[in-house]
Image (cartoon, helix red, strand yellow):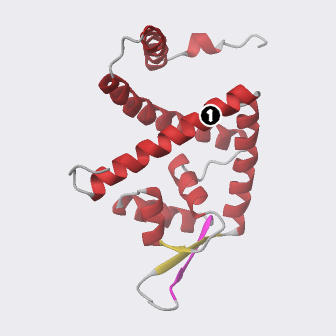
Amino acid sequence: MSGGISPLETDSAEQAADRAEEHRSQDDHRTGRVPATAIYHDIARIVERMHRRFLDVVRVELGRVGIDDISPVQVLMLMNIGTEELSVRDLMERGYYLGSNASYNLKQLVETGYVDRAPSLRDRRSARLRLSEKGMSLCAELRRLEATQADVLIRTDEDNADFDITYRTLRRLERAWSDIIRYDGREFD
């Protein structure tokens, strides 16, 4: 960097704490000292932090391409709509959005021209959503940026295998949590 502040100098207290926790966690895992319940607890917290960090990454990428009329959460909604035409209910179920938040964000996306909203042909009370040209263009740009980020993170076969294991583990955890909700906390297999 030429005369700028290094990333280490700009770390927040939260980032420093996260790094310290990560090192502790790595040491504990290597020595086999961590019980399964602690790992389970840590994974839930890591997922929460990763979601916040991902929103920050999206915010930075939006800034880099000069877009300031959409929030990172709204970008994730666009990516969930993708190339499909779907109902508001479908979007809420797919993205696990809360009703009032989804309604507010969808209204903003329609007003800023990222989403086209039309009444359903079968039920005029229901709305159908699809990306506008502006929305499709933004999603295409973000997919290119995601591909670039993936290329940086996944360079070797070992990296690819690690990401595959992580993906499968997170999907398994998502299914388990969905089953807990679906079966109202009763035991499940």
Label 1 crowd bin: few (<14), some (14–19), many (20+), radius 10 Å: some
Where residue 82 appears, as percent x and y from the top left, is 63, 63
Residue placed furthest toward the bottom: 122
Q: Nearer the viewer, residue 84 or 169?
A: 169
Residue drawn at x 48%, y 40% as measured from the top left: 170
- Left or right: residue 174 versus residue 8 is left
Residue placed furthest toward the front: 189
Q: Nearer the viewer, residue 166 or 24?
A: 166
Q: Height in image: 130 above or below 121?
A: above
Residue drawn at x 70%, y 48% as measured from the top left: 142
Magenta-colored span: 114-120
Q: Height in image: 146 above or below 101?
A: above
Based on the picture, tell me whether residue 182 belongs to the magenta stretch. no
Q: Quadrant of residue 96?
A: bottom left
Q: Height in image: 177 above or below 23?
A: below
Q: Quadrant of residue 47?
A: top left
- Left or right: residue 155 versus residue 101 is right
Screen quadrant of the N terminus:
top right
Dot 1 amino acid type: Phe
Label total for image: 1
Where residue 172 appears, as percent x and y from the top left, is 45, 44
Residue drawn at x 56%, y 59% as measured from the top left: 80
Q: Nearer the viewer, residue 119 or 82?
A: 82
Q: Main secondary structure of the magenta part?
A: strand
**Residue tagged 1:** 163
Q: Assign a secondary structure to mark 1.
A: helix
Q: Height in image: 70 above or below 90?
A: above
Q: Nearer the viewer, residue 40 or 62?
A: 40
Where residue 153 appears, as percent x and y from the top left, is 70, 29
Where residue 169 appears, as percent x and y from the top left, is 49, 38
